[in-house]
Image (cartoon, rainbow, N blue to C red):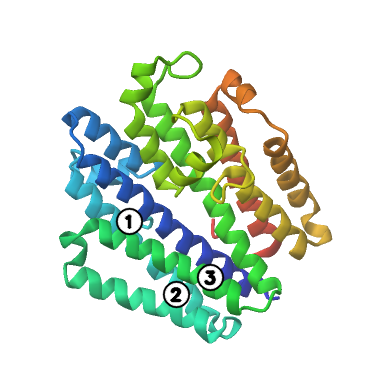
Amino acid sequence: MLSRTADHLYWMSRYTERAENTARMLDVNYQTSLLPQSAEVAQVGWQGMLSISELMPAYTAKHGAIVPKCVMEFMVKDDNNPSSIVSCLRAARENARAVRGSLTTEAWETQNQTWLEVNRALRNGEFERDPGQFFEWVKFRSHLSRGVTVGTMLMDEALHFMRLGTFLERADNTARLVDVKFHAVQSDFFGAASEKDQEYDFYHWSAILRSVSAFEIYRKVYRDVITPERVAELLILRADMPRSLHASMNEVVSNLEMVGTQQSAETMRLSGKLRAELQYGHIDEILATGLHAFLTQFLDRVNDLGARISRDFLVPSPA
C-alpha cells in the first residue's frame, strides 16, 4: 500500500474517534452542570475539559474567562480549533475523500453524510436547542462509521491502518480523561475513603464512567459501590472493557502485527512491551507509584508510538 494512502486512512479514523471522544466529554460535563453544585466546582469541570485536550491557552487567548457556553461553542463549532467536533469531522471527511477509491461506497458515504449533516444541524441551531441530543448524534455517527468499516471493508492493510488510528486515538483520550479527572479530585479517597466520601462523590465517579460508556459495565463487573480504585482498574487494566487502555493496546498490537515489516520491528517491540505492562500490571502497584506519573508516562509512550508509526509507514510529518 502507498504510504500516502495509509496516512489518509489512519488519520480519517483518528479524527472520527477524536470527534466522538470530544462529544463524550462535553456531554458528561453538560449533564453534570445541570446538577446542584457550586460555581467553583462547575468551573473545575469545564477547566478539566480544556486541559484534557491541551487547549487551555488557545481558549483563554480567544475567550478569557471560562464560561460554559463559550467552552461548548469552542469545542463544537470553532473552525479555528483543530480539536473541535466540526474540525475533526471535516478533517475525517477530507482524508476519506483523498482515498475514496480505497474505501467501500458505504464507508465513504457514511463519512460524507456525517459532514453534510453536522453542517445542517449547526446551521439550524440544533446544537443550541439540545446539546445532549447533538452529542448523542456525534457518538452514533462514529459508531456507524466503525460498524460500516468493519462490515464492508476487505480485511487487508487498509482496514488495519484504520483500526490502528482508531485505537491509538482511543488509548490517548482515555488516558487523558482518567488523568485529568482523577487529578482534579486531589483525593484522599484511595484506600481509606469513608462511606460519606464515597456517597458524596458518587456523581463524580459515575460521570467518568458514563463518559466512556462504562457505567453499566462497572455494575456488571463489580456489583458494588463505585470506588476510585475500581474505576481506575476498569479503565486502565481490564482487557474486556472496550475503551480501556489495555483493550486499546491489544488492538494496536494486533493490527501492527498485520502490517509490520522489518523496518517496524522496534515499533512492534515497544507496543508489545507497553501492552504487556498493562496485561500483567496490578492496580495497587500503579496507585502506589502514583497514578498521574503512570498515565503521564503512558501518554508519552503512546505519542512516541504514533510518531514511530508515522515514520515507519506513513507520510513524514512536516517539520
Whether residue 77 is visible, yes or no, is: no
Using the numbered discs, state the Cα–Cα distance from disc 1 to disc 2 in whole angstroms.
16 Å
Q: Secondary structure at mark 1?
A: loop
Which of pointers 2 and 3 indicates the residue nearer the eye? 3
- Marks 1 and 3 sit apart, C-alpha to C-alpha, by 28 Å
Return the residue at label 3. Answer: 147
User: Label 1 amino acid?
Assistant: Asn
Left/right placement of residue 199 relative to residue 306 reads left
Q: Is residue 100 visible?
A: yes
Q: Which type of secondary structure does the marked residue at label 3 adopt?
A: helix
Q: Secondary structure at mark 2?
A: helix
Q: Residue at x 51, y 60 (%)?
A: 14
Q: Which residue is mark 1?
A: 81
- Residue 186: percent from the left, percent from the top? 39, 21
- Who's the residue at 24% across and 29% down the image? 41
Residue 189 picture location, percent across and down = 43, 19
Relative vertical location of residue 277 with respect to residue 6 in this rendering, above or below = above
Neighbor class of circle 1 (other Cα within 10 Å; few <14, some 14-19, many 20+) is some
Q: Which residue is mark 2?
A: 94
Determine which quarter of the picture holds residue 159.
bottom right
* Rendered image quadrant of residue 313: bottom right
